[in-house]
Amino acid sequence: MAVSYRFPISCWVGLHVSGIEVSEAGYVREPATFVDMGEGIAANEFTIQWPECPADWGPIDEANLYDAPVGGTLIGIGLTASVVQGLRYDRLRIPAAGYQIYRAARGLGFGTYTWGTGRYATWSYLTAPGNGLGSPYGLAPFGVGPYEAMEQGPLLLKTFGQVLLCGGVAGDWTPAGPYSVV
């Protein structure tokens, strides 16, 4: 049975490394609200930001949606637009409207599990919209099956941690020598 969602919807976003949720120090799922943007698509209303990484979290390749801050049910899967290394002192974030999802369940695409084995199957969770026409030959990176659209992944970004010199206060370090600071 297809699942349908009404917006706005509140959920939590969890970061994953190769399908496993991050469990390193300082990590928590972050709350998000998705609002209707029209044309069957919803997106996060505000920037979603995680606390500064006190340890390396690894190469983040998924930002998944849950119905609870801990445990709960997986309601959406989003492969990030690119893999982002969550390193110590970094702050990871998804800008407003950087995570777009379909408002309701959709078909898996042409091929296995839809028109082939397991006919007319649909996703039972929220998923990213397609961002282009796939390959008629079923070759990556243009699509998995004939004319399948590739998913538009969440835009996960990072801000590098602040670096403080010497005493830890901006301006307390001055180079030695006959040089002037301009």
Image (cartoon, rainbow, N blue to C red):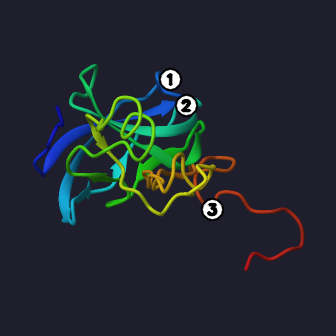
Left or right position of 129 against 158: left
Identify the image quadrant of the N terminus: top left
The percent coordinates of residue 5 (x first, y second) are 14, 44
Q: Earlier in the sequence, mark 3 or mark 2?
A: 2
Q: Look at mark 2 in the image and give the residue it sits on.
A: 57
Q: Of 36 and 156, which appears nearest the observer?
A: 36
Between the C-alphas of marks 1 and 2, the distance is 6 Å
CB atoms of marks 1 and 2 within 8 Å: yes
Q: Is 125 above or below relative to 7? A: above
Q: Tell which circle, 1 or 2, labels the residue nearer the N-terminal end.
A: 1
Q: Which secondary structure lies at badge 1?
A: loop
Quadrant of the frame with the C terminus: bottom right
* Residue type marked 2: Trp
Of residue 165 and residue 26, the one placed in the foreground of this image is 26
The amino acid pointed to by label 1 is Glu
Give the camera-side residue of 80 and 91: 80
How far is mark 3 from mark 2, CA to CA?
31 Å
Quadrant hosting residue 125: top left
Badge 3 crowding class, 10 Å Cα cut-off, few under 14, some 14 to 19, many 20 or more, is few
In the picture as drawn, the residue positioned furthest to the right comes out as 178
On the image, numbered disc 3 is attached to which residue? 171
Cβ atoms at labels 3 and 1 below 8 Å apart:
no
Which residue, given by chain and number where applicable, does mark 1 sit on?
24
The image quadrant that residue 71 belongs to is top left
**What mark, if any, has residue 122 been given in the picture?**
none
Q: Quadrant of residue 86?
A: top right
Type of amino acid at the residue the image marks with label 3: Gly
